[in-house]
Amino acid sequence: MKISRIAVPSLLVAAATAVFAAGVGYDNTPQIPGQKWKVHDKARPNPPVITPGATFSHLAPAPSDAKVLFDGKNLDAWKSGNKEAKWKVENGYFEVVKGGGDIETKEKFADFQLHIEWASPTPPKGDSQGRGNSGVFLHGLYEVQVLDVYKNKTYADGQAGGLYGQWAPLVEASVKPGEWNSYDIIFEGPRFDDAGTVTRKASVTVIHNGAVLHHRQEFTGPSGHQNVPKYVKYDSTGPIRLQDHGDPVRFRNIWIRPIGTYDRPE
Ligand code: MG
């Protein structure tokens, strides 16, 4: 489906009050349950753009109890389907190889804290969802969007840090293409009863370059394009999956800490 586009002179501005004209997106998609908006609604306002502070922890060492998923050297912790992950590793980061397919961690995780850094391709190419698109899929199902939004208008629930097709970020805190962003994500997976009904939806807190984008926000269901998939019972664990959307997005410094329980025996 063709996506209409409105030229926006500058998306990343210092003012925190930027509001953009509607127009990019859809008006023939399903309603998002519990919200006034349709999926990728072109009338949904884009959130304010902020300039992040300098306190976010790019390339900071992982906590001692974290599992390091990428330390700049190799993709040993990752796979692509049942095959070796083929994305390009160089200079301490890895990069999406177009057609290489999504990659996901070999290990599955339940509830966790995840740190991941990403950078959009430079020079930028494409527009709307075609510019610097990738994504961090939690449990392989729930996408925190990765997108280059610098001078690039797209629908609100599809911009960087959006819970794709469901929630726009509270603010847009991206830096320019080629510069490094950090996501710190705290995720709690869904719970199901014996009949397969979801008793607690998956929820997430996302901090982007030091700014909260979502706080304990529930996923309506797994992420979908132009639809709202329903929960289907699974064991409430899954991999971290990164999306090959055809754009050479880079990632580095990835680590994860399972969220434990209080009062564990010594
Ligand atoms: Mg994506």
Image (tube, helix red, strand yellow):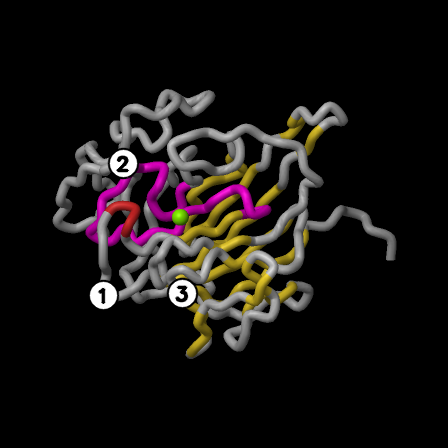
Query: Where is mark 2, residue-wise?
Result: 1
Q: Nearer the viewer, mark 2 or mark 1?
A: 2
At label 2, the amino acid type is Met
Q: CA distance from mark 1 to mark 3?
A: 16 Å
Q: Residue 256 is drawn in which quadrant?
A: bottom right
The location of residue 123, given as percent across then percent down, is: 22, 65
Expressed as whole percent of the image width and height from the top left, the position of residue 176 reads 27, 60
* Residue 85 in the image, given as x and y percentages of width and height: 53, 66
Q: Which mark, by number, is residue 97?
A: 3
Q: Is residue 156 magenta?
A: yes
* Label 2 with label 3: CB-CB less than 8 Å: no
Name the residue located 32 percent from the left edge and 56 percent from the top edge: 132
Q: CA distance from mark 2 to mark 3?
A: 24 Å
Residue at 45%, 53% in the rendered image = 243
Q: Residue at x 23, y 40 (%)?
A: 17
Q: Quadrant of the C terminus?
A: bottom right
Rendered view: 88 above or below 242: below
Q: Residues within 10 Å of mark 2 (few under 14, many from 20)?
A: few
Report, in whole angstroms, how far the alpha carbon at label 2 lies from the one at label 1.
Answer: 26 Å
Who comes first in sequence, dot 2 or dot 1? 2
Residue 264 can be seen, yes or no = yes
Decide whether residue 237 is among the magenta residues. Answer: no
Secondary structure of the residue carrying tag 2 is: loop
Magenta span: 138-162
Q: Mark 1 or mark 3, which has the lower sequence index?
A: 3
The amino acid beneath tag 3 is Val
Which one is in front in this view, the residue at disc 1 or the one at disc 3?
Answer: 3
